[in-house]
Amino acid sequence: MRHLSFPKDFLWGGGLADFQAEGGYEESGRGLTTLDFVTDGSHTEPRRITYVMPDGTKHVQPARGRALPDGARGYLDENYYYPSLHAVDFAFHYKEDIRMLAEMGSSVFRFSICWTRIFPRGDEETPNEKGLAFYESIVDECRKYKIEPLITICHDEIPAYLADHYGGWLNRYTIDCYLKLCRALFERLGSRVKYWITFNEINSLNGYISLGCTRYDDYSRYVGAHHMFIASALAVKMCHEMIPGSMVGAMYASSPCYPLTCKPKDVFKQMQVRRRTFYFSDVMMRGYYPGYAKTILEEAGVTIPMEEGDEEILREGTLDFYSFSCYRSTTVNENTVFPIKGLEIMSMDTNPYLETTAWGWPKDPMSLRYVLNEVWDRYQKPLFIAENGLGEIDKADENGYVEDDYRIEYLKEHFKEIRKAICLDGVKVLGYTMWGCIDLVSLGTGEMKKRYGWIYVDMDDKGNGSKKRTKKKSWYWMKEFLESGGEILAQDDDPLIL
Ligand code: BGP
C-alpha cells in the first residue's frame, strides 16, 4: 500500500468574510455597503433588501434573483434586523480569535476587506487611516503566530455610494475605484502579505448586492464581469510590481456538477453548465475569452463593451492560482435551464447516492478531488481550496461546548480526498481554509444557526448573546490532526490507494 502524506508546506487554516464576521459598524467610521441593507432570513424565508425610491417611498423585496426599480437606493429601516452591521463582532474579538486559530496549529487565515472601511464612499482620493490600521493590525496578529494572511480584496459587496451614484460594476469608473483600494492595500500590507484574491465567487455575482446595479439579468452579469476581469488583471499587474513574489488568484464557486444519467444529452448539458463557471476562470487564468463565450453571449443577447487595450490588459494580467469554494455537488440533465443569471447552478435534481445537510446541500467528499483534478487539468496552475466546510445546527451545552462529531467526519472525508488529489493525481494544492472557522452569519440565509466553525460563538439569529467564543470538539480534533501532520487520517479505506 502506498503511504499518502500532505506536503510539509501545505497551508491549513480557516476563513471568513468581513460582512459576516466583523461588525463594529458605528465605531469604525466605515461607509455602508450594499450588503448592509440585507435583512436576516432563514432556510424557508428569503433574505430581503430594503430600499428607498427618489420620491421617498420605502420598499422591501427578496434580496436576490430580482432587479430593483430604476433609481432605488439601499436604505436601513428601523423595523428590520441587518446582520452585517454587527455580525459576530470579529472587529472586537480578532486578537482572541486569531490566537485560538494559532493554538490549533493554523498556518493560514483568510479574511476579506470591507471596502468602505478604507474608502467609505468608494470614490475618495485618500484612504481612511483607521480602516488601514485595522487590517494592518489583523495582519500583524497573524504574523505574530507565523500565520500566512490570505486576503480577499472584494467579497460579494460594493460601497453603497458607488452603487447608488455610479451604477457599480456596470460603470468602468468602478475599476479606478477598485484599483485605488488595491494600491492602498498593497502599499500598507504588501511587505507582510503574499497571497491575494481579487474577487470572491466572481462567477456567482449579479444585481445590487454584488455588482451595485439595479439590473439583474444577463447583461448586468456579463458586462459587470468584464469590468471586474479588467480590474482583476490590472490588480494582478500592480500587485506583482509592488510586491515581488506575491501570488494573486481569484475565487470561483466551483462545486462540480454531474450528469444525471449517461444519456449523451445529459452528459453534454453537464459540459455546457460547467462552462458557465469556466467562462469566468478561462478569461482570468488564460487571458482571453474562450471560443464558446461567443455562443453564451449571443444566446444572452449581450455584447461585451470591449475597449481598445482591454485584450492586452487581460493577456498581461493572468492569475497565479485558482482558488475556489466547493461544499457539495449538483446534478444536471438535458432539460436543465440556465435560470441562473448570476447564481452558480445549484441542484437541479436530487442525487440519490448522497445524503444532505439540514440545509439540503448534498455531502460529497469526492467532489473535492473531482474539482481539484478538473481545474488542474485545465490550467496547470496551483489551486487553493478557499472554502469548504459543513454548515449545521450545533447544540452547545451550558458552557458553549459543542460535540460536533458530524463536522469531524465531514472534514476527515474531505481531507482524504484532498490528499488523494495531491498524492495520487499529482495536483498542486497550496492550502485549505475551512469556511466560517469562527461561527458567523450565513450569507445565503442570514441565520446564525447555520454554523460552520471550529469555534462556537454565543449569538442567535437576531444578534442576541454574549458573543463568547468556545472551542468545539472539532477544534480539538483539528489540533490533533495538524500536530500529526495529517497522519491521523486512515490510509486504507479506498481501493485506489492499494
Ligand atoms: C459562499 C460565500 C461565503 C459563504 C459560503 C457559505 O458562497 O463566499 O461568504 O457564506 O458561501 O454559504 P452560506 O453562508 O449561505 O451557508
Image (tube, rainbow, N blue to C red):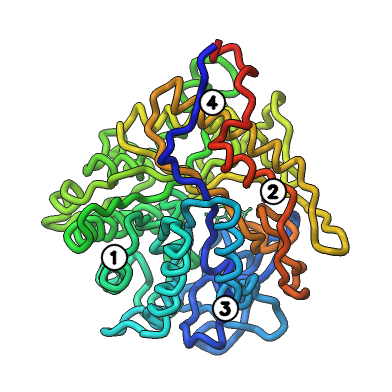
Describe residue 225's horizontal placement relative to residue 1 as left or right: left
Mark 2 closeness class: few <14, some 14–19, many ≥20 residues within 10 Å:
some
What's the residue type where badge 1 is placed?
A: Gly
Q: Regarding mark 1 in the picture, which secondary structure is present there? A: loop
**Can you identify the residue that label 1 sits on?**
190
Quadrant of the rendered image holding ligand 1: bottom right
Residue 137 versus residue 259 in the image, above or below: below
Q: Toward the viewer: 49 or 375? A: 375
* Closest to the observer, 446 or 70: 446
The residue wearing badge 4 is 334
Residue marked by disc 3: 51
Residue drawn 28% across the image and 42% down it: 285
Circle 3 SS class: strand
Dot placed on the residue nearer the N-terminal end, 4 or 2: 4
Whole-Å distance between the Cαs marked 1 and 3? 38 Å
- The label nearer to you, 2 versus 3, is 2
The numbered mark, 2 or 1, whose residue comes first in the sequence reads 1
**In terms of sequence position, does the residue under pointer 3 or pointer 4 come before the other?**
3
Q: Is residue 41 left or right of residue 114?
A: right
Residue at the far front: name it: 483
Callout 3 amino acid: Tyr
Could you tell which of marks 1 and 3 lies nearer the N-terminus?
Answer: 3
Judging from the image, what secondary structure is the residue with disc 4 in? loop
- N-terminal-most mark, 2 or 3: 3
Q: Which residue type does callout 2 highlight?
A: Tyr
Quadrant of the image containing the C terminus: top right
Circle 2 sits in a helix, a strand or a loop, which is it? helix
Q: Residues within 10 Å of mark 1 (few under 14, many from 20)?
A: some
Whether label 4 lies within 8 Å of ligand 1 gets the answer no
**Any mark on residue 476, and which?**
2
Residue 284 relative to residue 392: left or right: left
